[in-house]
Image: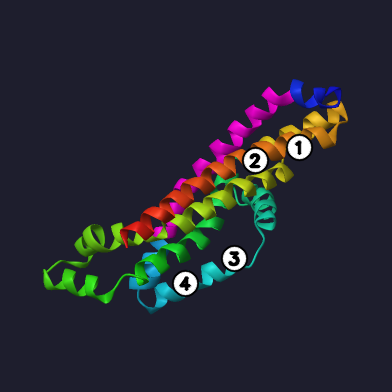
């Protein structure tokens, strides 16, 4: 038990890092979700130029590792005169990255709706914005909820990469503790357990949403 004293003594510090991890993930998930919905709508309803632009964005972002994008933005943004605080710069990069994946989830949800839903909305004389607001988006978002939560789990784990650019969160906190205690095995077991608890809670919520979707159909 004495072997785990470094972890026990440092656990509150790791929890503070976990709080920053959750804050960063939640802050990035909000704009990622909004941008993902917008990109999905542009793919489905946009003209040829808009669709081509969105597809090019998706291919570019999904074809580059997040770590490369974080490092690139960390060094590039100051050179272009954009001086964002590190936290918001990282949130922006993560949001733009995961929006590319979320857009495909939302697009699949929109396209999976039966044609009868579209025809019924048109038959009632709904305009496209009203049809999207009342009929299409509520059902599409409900269908997309389980895979969306899975992406949020991935987003939480991806925040561990930001320690590379010097931003403090759970992984950075763990590395600091290891440097003080020289107990990497014990400390990273604790960090892994914290990550697991966060992601497992999200995964359980995703399973709950999946059961609700299946029950609804």
* Colour convention: rainbow
**Nearer to us in this view, 102 or 81:** 102
Q: Is residue 142 visible?
A: no
Circle 3 is placed at which residue position?
62
Region of the chain picked out in magenta, as a range: 10-37
Q: Is residue 72 left or right of residue 33?
A: right
Q: CA distance from mark 1 to mark 2?
A: 10 Å
Circle 4 is placed at which residue position?
53
Q: Residue at x 69, y 50 (%)?
A: 75
Q: Residue at x 21, y 64 (%)?
A: 131
Between label 3 and label 4, give the one nearer the viewer.
Answer: 3
Q: List x then y, in percent, for residue 66.
A: 65, 56
Q: Is residue 73 visible?
A: yes
Q: CA distance from mark 1 to mark 4?
A: 44 Å
Q: Earlier in the sequence, mark 1 or mark 4?
A: 4
Q: CA distance from mark 3 to mark 4?
A: 14 Å
Circle 1 is placed at which residue position?
189
Residue 32, magenta (yes or no): yes
Q: Residue furthest left?
A: 124
Q: Are marks 3 and 2 in contact (CB under 8 Å)?
A: no
Q: Are marks 1 and 3 in contact (CB under 8 Å)?
A: no
Between label 3 and label 2, give the one nearer the viewer.
Answer: 2
Vertical relation: 66 (above or below) 24: below
Q: Tell me if mark 2 has few (under 14), some (14-19) or many (20+) residues whose alpha carbon lies within 10 angstroms of its own.
A: many
Q: Which mark is residue 195?
A: 2
Q: Are marks 1 and 4 in contact (CB under 8 Å)?
A: no
Instruction: Determine which quarter of the picture holds residue 40.
Output: bottom left
Q: Earlier in the sequence, mark 1 or mark 2?
A: 1
- Quadrant of the drawing holding the N terminus: top right
Q: Tell me if mark 1 has few (under 14), some (14-19) or many (20+) residues whose alpha carbon lies within 10 angstroms of its own.
A: some
Callout 2: SS: helix
């Amino acid at each position: 038990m004495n072997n785990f004293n470094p972890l026990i003594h440092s656990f509150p510090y790791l929890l503070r890092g976990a709080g920053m991890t959750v804050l960063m993930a939640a802050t990035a998930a909000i704009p990622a979700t909004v941008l993902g919905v917008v990109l999905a709508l542009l793919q489905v309803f946009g003209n040829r130029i808009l669709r081509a632009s969105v597809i090019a964005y998706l291919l570019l972002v999904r074809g580059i590792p997040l770590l490369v994008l974080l490092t690139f933005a960390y060094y590039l943004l100051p050179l272009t005169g954009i001086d964002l605080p590190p936290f918001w710069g990282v949130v922006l990069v993560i949001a733009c990255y995961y929006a590319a994946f979320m857009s495909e989830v939302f697009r699949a949800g929109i396209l999976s709706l039966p044609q009868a839903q579209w025809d019924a909305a048109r038959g009632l004389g709904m305009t496209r914005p009203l049809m999207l607001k009342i009929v299409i988006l509520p059902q599409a978002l409900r269908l997309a909820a389980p895979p969306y939560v899975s992406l949020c789990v991935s987003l939480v784990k991806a925040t561990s990469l930001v320690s590379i650019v010097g931003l403090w969160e759970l992984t950075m906190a763990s590395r600091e503790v290891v440097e003080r205690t020289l107990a990497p095995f014990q400390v990273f077991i604790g960090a892994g357990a914290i990550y697991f608890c966060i992601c497992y809670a999200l995964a359980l919520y995703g399973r709950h949403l999946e059961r609700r979707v299946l029950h609804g159909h």
